[in-house]
Image: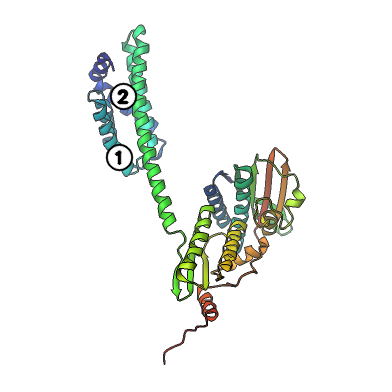
Amino acid sequence: MEPSIIDFIYKRKQLLVEKWLEEVESVTQDSAITRIPEDIYSETNREFIDVIVNTLHVSPEEAKERLRSFVERLIHIGWPLSYFTRGLQAFRRVILEEMKENTQAEQAFSTFGEVENWIDGIVNQLVDEYTGSWENTLNLQKLALKELSAPLIPVFSHISVMPLIGTIDTERAKLIMENLLEGIIEHRSQVVLIDITGVPVVDTMVAHHIIQAAEAVRLVGAECILVGIRPEIAQTIVNLGIDLGKFPTKSTLRKGIESGLEVTNKKIVEIE
Amino acid sequence: MSSQSCVEVHTEWGIVSARQAGRNKAKEIGFGNVDQARITTAISELARNIYLYAEKGEICIGEVSEMGGAGVKKGLQITAKDVGPGIDNIREVMADGFTTSGGLGAGLPGVKRLMDHFDIESTSGEGTTITAIKWLR
């Protein structure tokens, strides 16, 4: 940026900061920021404006780094992005206002352009940092969700249980099928209990996936028992007209295990 | 209609949030456990149809009331709207076991059975609007 502009901004730093603080008070009043304690808020305002102005006199890399560490800290405590974008818009308004009064017309255009570029650069970096951190969180959560997606647990010899918890979407349905079939081979299961106690809604699509999974289980030579059908789910299944008559169903996991033991010719006896 | 909230559906997560909105509204109106499950399942079916066939659309959930013989009765209304390909053969679609996606073909007739009132309007090439109401007993 032209040294004259930097000079211009520096000379009026105090004034610009004052004006900006006033401006920013009014634009952020309606946003989520009002829940943040007063002292932290004004401290962050000061720090923010310092970081912005300081980007002018250090090298671009250095400036980027400083902005990054500042933003990272605020992302961490959950500061909203809208605060930054509104704050920067306010800052631009304040500077341009100030320049309008003190610059010649012929210079004005190029000066405005430079200031715009400078502010835009900061906005871009901020948005990048924020989306980066969101994407990161999203990916981590996806991964975490996938990890607890559909485990097949061997409980007795030849009897395994797959507890399903949460919404079943297409991706998860695929995982259920894969884990089920692989697990049956690995644990040499004869009976698999699919427990849907934790599935909030059983619609036709979920039912369809379960029916397909049960059919596939039958093809690899095992038997599938659907357990954990809550009364309200039973009613909606009947209302929907879904036919689950092809494989046995039980109300609870315990009853499922009992009939699983029967199939494998075992029973639990009390020790005398 | 006093209050209505709409949820856009264009991903599978839209289905989940539409369902959540429906469950909350049903609870608020005072539906019991079984009817809550019926309502959420109906929303799930309608939202999935939007996602599968129209790619995007919206589900609106609101409270309705009607003067009946025994006074004012309250209900929950689901409106599923899309500007997708529309349905040519509504009669076939409403029959059990009819499917174009390899599913069970129980979706729309199922929704009709789950709810008390069911109304479907569709123009080929212009979109589909489905309205369904469950009355509080």
What amino acid type is highlighted by mark number 1?
Answer: Glu
Q: Residues within 10 Å of mark 1 (few under 14, many from 20)?
A: some
Q: Nearer the viewer, residue A31 or B8?
A: B8
Q: Residues within 10 Å of mark 2 (few under 14, many from 20)?
A: some
Q: Label 1 to label 2, Cα distance in Å?
A: 26 Å
What amino acid type is highlighted by mark number 2?
Answer: Lys
* Image quadrant in which you'd find residue B126: top right
In the picture, measured across the screen, residue A191 lies left or right of residue A14, that is right
Q: The N terminus of chain A is located in which quarter?
A: top left
Residue appearing at x 37%, y 39% in the figure:
A132
Residue labelled with disc 2 = A19
Question: CB of mark 1 within 8 Å of CB of mark 2?
Answer: no
Q: The C terminus of chain A is located in which quarter?
A: bottom left
Mark 1 or mark 2: whose residue is earlier in sequence: 2
Residue appearing at x 40%, y 54% in the figure:
A144
Question: Which structural element holds mark 2?
Answer: helix
Residue appearing at x 34%, y 31% in the figure:
A125
Chain letter for mark 1: A
x, y percent for residue B35: 61, 61
Task: Let me know if marks 1 and 2 both belong to one chain.
Answer: yes
Residue labelled with disc 1 = A72
Residue appearing at x 64%, y 42% in the figure:
B82
In the picture, measured across the screen, residue A160 lies left or right of residue B55, that is left
Residue A25 seen by the camera = no
x, y percent for residue A254: 50, 76
In the rendered view, tell whether residue A45 sits above or below residue B91: above
Chain letter for mark 2: A
* Image quadrant in which you'd find residue A60: top left
